[in-house]
Amino acid sequence: MAFHVYDTTLRDGAQQEGMNLSVADKLAIAPLLDELGVGFIEGGWPGAVPKDTEFFARAATELNLKHAVLAAFGATRKVGVPAADDPQVRALLDSQAPVITLVAKADIRHVERALRTTGSENLAMITDTVRFLTGEGRRVFVDAEHFFDGYRYDADYAVECVRAAFDAGAEVVALCDTNGGMLPDWVAEIVAKVRAAVGPDAVLGMHAHNDTGCAVANTLAAVAAGAEHVQGTVNGYGERTGNADLITVVANVELKHGRRLLAGHGLEEVTRIAHAISEITNISPYGRQPYVGASAFAHKAGLHASAIKVDPDLYQHIDPTAVGNDMRMLISDMAGRASIELKGRELGFDLAGQGDTLGRIATRVKQAEAAGYTYDAADASFELMLLEEVGGGRPEFFSVESWRTIVERAGSRGTEATAEATVKLHAGGERIVSTGEGNGPVNALDHALRQALARVYPEIADFELIDFKVRILDQMQGTDATTRVLIESTDGERSWSTVGVGPNIIEASWEALTDSIIFGLFCRGVAPR
Ligand SMILES: CC(=O)SCCNC(=O)CCNC(=O)[C@H](O)C(C)(C)COP(=O)(O)OP(=O)(O)OC[C@H]1O[C@@H](n2cnc3c(N)ncnc32)[C@H](O)[C@@H]1OP(=O)(O)O
Ligand SMILES: CC(=O)C(=O)O
C-alpha cells in the first residue's frame, strides 16, 4: 500500500498566529512542496476563505505540479441540509481539486455541544457528504476531528464515525489530535485498536498538533501502529503551538526506518526548501529545528570536535548532506585545539599538526570570550584572528589616526537629536579626513568611515549593514557596564558577522564596524592600496 505524505502548510500552517499568506505566497510555496516530493498539498478552504477560493482557481492554470495532488479542505454538510444544497460543499466541488478533505466531528461531546445535533445526524452528515462528493468523481479523505479525545471519552462513537466515512467511500481517514493533548503511548494504543476495528485495508492517517511537544513523536507512534498517511506542515507551522513538522516526520521515517516516502530526491534538498518557505512566510527559520536548522549540525564543545576530527559520525546522528545541511564548527570559550583545527579547515587554513599554534589560538579565544567577545556569532572576527595568528597578519587596508563623534540636540524637548562623526585615517597613500552625519553616533561613524574609504576602495559601496545587536554584559554595573556589539553585513552575495567589545557602545561598535569593512574587502580579494 502506498504511503501518503500530506502537507497542510497552506491550510493548517496558515492558521498560525501572525501568518498571513497571500494567494501569490501560496502559489510560490506549492511548487516548493512539490519539489520536496509530498504526495498531497492541501491548499486551503475554498468557499470559506476568499483567498483560498482564488488560490484553487489560479492553481488550475498557474501551477504545474509534478508529483503532488491538490486537496481542498472543507467541512461535512450543515445539520439538516442536503449535501448537494450546502453552498460550502458546492464550493469544494467548484474548486476542481481532485482530492477533497472533509473535517468531520468524531467526538460526541463536540457533536452535541458545538454542532448542537445528535450522534446519528453527525453520522449522516459524514455519510451524505462523502457519498455526494465521491459520486461527483472526487477522491475524498476525512479528517476525524478531535478523534483521540473523542475515543478516550466514547470509543464506540469515535470508531463509528471512522466506519461511516469508510463505508461511504472515503479513501483515507486521518485521526486528528486536534487539541494536541496526546502522548505517544496513548496514540500507539488507540491507533492499534482502530486498525483492528477497521481491518488491514483501510488507510488510516495521523494529524497531530504540538501542544504537548509530541506532535512528531505522536505521528511516528501512529505510523508504527499502522497509519499509512501522515499529515503535517513544513517547519511545523500551525494553530497554537503548531502541527507536526512534516520535515522531521519524513526525515525520521526515511532515514531511520529506511522507508521511502517522498517522490524524487526532495530530502536531499529539504534544508534549502525549508528556508525558501521561511522566506515566503516571512517567519525566521528556527535555528534548532531538527535536520534543517542552522544549528542542527553545529558543534561547540571542544570534546565533540576532538572526536569529530577522527570521524564526524562519532557526534552526528546522520550525515548532514542527506538533508542538504552542513556540519559547522563553532568557536567559543568551549573550544579546544581540535575545534580550532576543524574551524580553520572550514575557513581554508590547514593547521593540522600545529599543536602549539592551535593551543595559542584556543587560549586567545578563551581570554577574549572571558572579556566579552563571542565568536560563535561572529565567524568573520574569528577569521581575522586566524589571519593575525597564522595568515601573515590582517590586511592593512587603512590605518586609523583618530575618530570622534558628537551627539547634539538643537531646540527644545521633542526635537530629534542628531549625530556627527569625524574620522581621520590613512589609505591609498593619503591622509583622509571625513565627516558624516547620522541619526545616532554609530550611524554617523559608519557614514564617515565609508565616505573616507569610498574613493580608495569603491567596493565598499556594495557593503550594507543588515543587523546591529547590542548587549550589555555586566548588567549589575549600570552605565559602567561592558558593551558587546554584533554586526551583520552583506555585499549582496554573502553575509558575515563581526564583534566588538568595549567600555562603551561607540567604541565596541567602531571595532565591529572596522572589522566588518576589513573582512568584506579581504573576502572580495582586494589588495591593500
Ligand atoms: C480543526 C480545524 O482547524 S478545522 C479548520 C478550521 N478552519 C477555519 O475555521 C478557517 C475557515 N473558517 C471560516 O472561514 C468560517 O469559520 C466558516 C466560513 C467556515 C464558517 O463561518 P460561519 O458560517 O460564520 O460560522 P462559524 O464560524 O461561526 O461557525 C462554524 C459553523 O460550522 C459548523 N461546523 C463546525 N464543524 C463542522 C463540521 N465538521 N461539519 C459541519 N459543520 C460544522 C458549526 O456548528 C457552526 O455552525 P453554525 O453556524 O450553524 O453555528
Ligand atoms: C482537521 C484539523 O486541522 C484538526 O483536527 O486539527
Image (tube, rainbow, N blue to C red):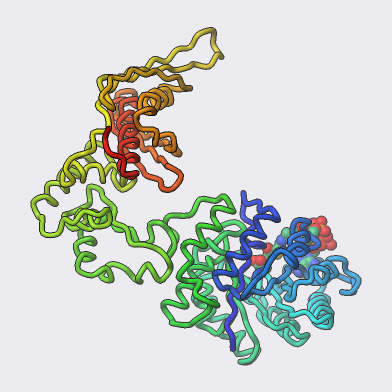
Residue at horizontal 56%, vertical 58%?
277
Residue found at the far left of this picture: 356
| Above or below, 29 relative to 72 | above
Residue found at the far top of this picture: 411
Which quadrant of the view contains residue 339?
bottom left
Looking at the rendered structure, the number of numbered marks drawn on it comes to: 0
* In front of the other: 334 or 43: 43
| Above or below, 456 relative to 417 | below
Residue at horizontal 61%, vertical 78%?
205
Which quadrant of the view contains residue 111?
bottom right
Q: Quadrant of ligand 1?
A: bottom right
What is the quadrant of the C terminus in the image? top left
Q: Is residue 491 left or right of residue 122?
A: left
What is the quadrant of the N terminus in the image? bottom right
In this rendering, does residue 504 appear at all? yes
Residue at horizontal 54%, vertical 68%?
246
Position in image of residue 314 (x %, y %): 25, 70
Position in image of residue 215 (x %, y %): 53, 67
Residue at horizontal 91%, vertical 71%?
85
Position in image of residue 169 (x %, y %): 76, 85
Position in image of residue 511 (x %, y %): 30, 31
Q: Is residue 500 left or right of residue 109?
A: left
Which quadrant of the view contains residue 31?
bottom right
In this rendering, does residue 114 appear at all? no
| Above or below, 178 relative to 524 | below
Q: Is residue 389 left or right of residue 480?
A: left
